[in-house]
Amino acid sequence: MRVRETKYEQYGITREQAKQAKRYCLNARGERARSLRRAAKKANPEIADDLFISLRDGRSYDLQMAHRYIPISRPDFYGYRRLCLAFFYKSLFPEEFADEKGR
């Protein structure tokens, strides 16, 4: 399945957990910002900076494209953003995912 079509549940987190992760992302500083950046790089190294800015600053794809070119389409961007949020949430609460190997 393509990333653009993958939902949070397929990454092993609920929509509520994704919302919680988004709240942790906003204005992230220090170790939390480093964890978010690692999650963005793991999701897609090519657009990691764009994913990081989108989640930390709450900036949409369109707003970012007005200032800087992003080399993928909007549906793909938001697919990778969902993947990044899943990685980030799992890094915040690793004990919930201890039985998952390498995901």
Image (cartoon, rainbow, N blue to C red):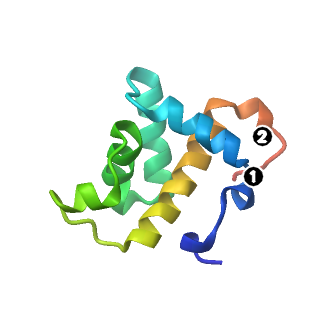
The disc placed on residue 97 is 2
Q: Secondary structure at mark 1?
A: loop
Q: Quick one: which residue is furthest to the bottom in this view?
A: 1
* Residue drawn where x is 50% and y is 53% of the image: 42
The disc placed on residue 50 is none
Q: Is residue 96 left or right of residue 68?
A: right
Of the image marks 2 and 1, the number of the one nearer the N terminus? 1
Residue 47: image location, x then y, percent: 34, 59
Q: Quadrant of residue 92?
A: top right
* Residue drawn where x is 46% and y is 42% of the image: 38
Mark 1 neighbour density, 10 Å: few (under 14) some (14–19) many (20 or more): some
Q: Is residue 34 above or below residue 3?
A: above
Q: Quick one: which residue is furthest to the left in this view?
A: 67
Residue 51: image location, x then y, percent: 39, 51
In which quadrant is the N terminus drawn? bottom right
- Please name the amino acid that badge 1 sits on: Gly
Q: Is residue 78 above or below residue 14?
A: below
Q: Is residue 88 above or below residue 75?
A: above
Q: Which residue is mark 1?
A: 12
Tell me if label 2 and label 1 are in contact, CB under 8 Å.
yes
* Residue drawn where x is 15% and y is 57% of the image: 67
Q: Is residue 3 left or right of residue 102?
A: left
Residue 95: image location, x then y, percent: 77, 30
- Please name the amino acid that badge 2 sits on: Phe
Q: Quick one: which residue is furthest to the right in this view?
A: 99
Q: Secondary structure at mark 2?
A: helix
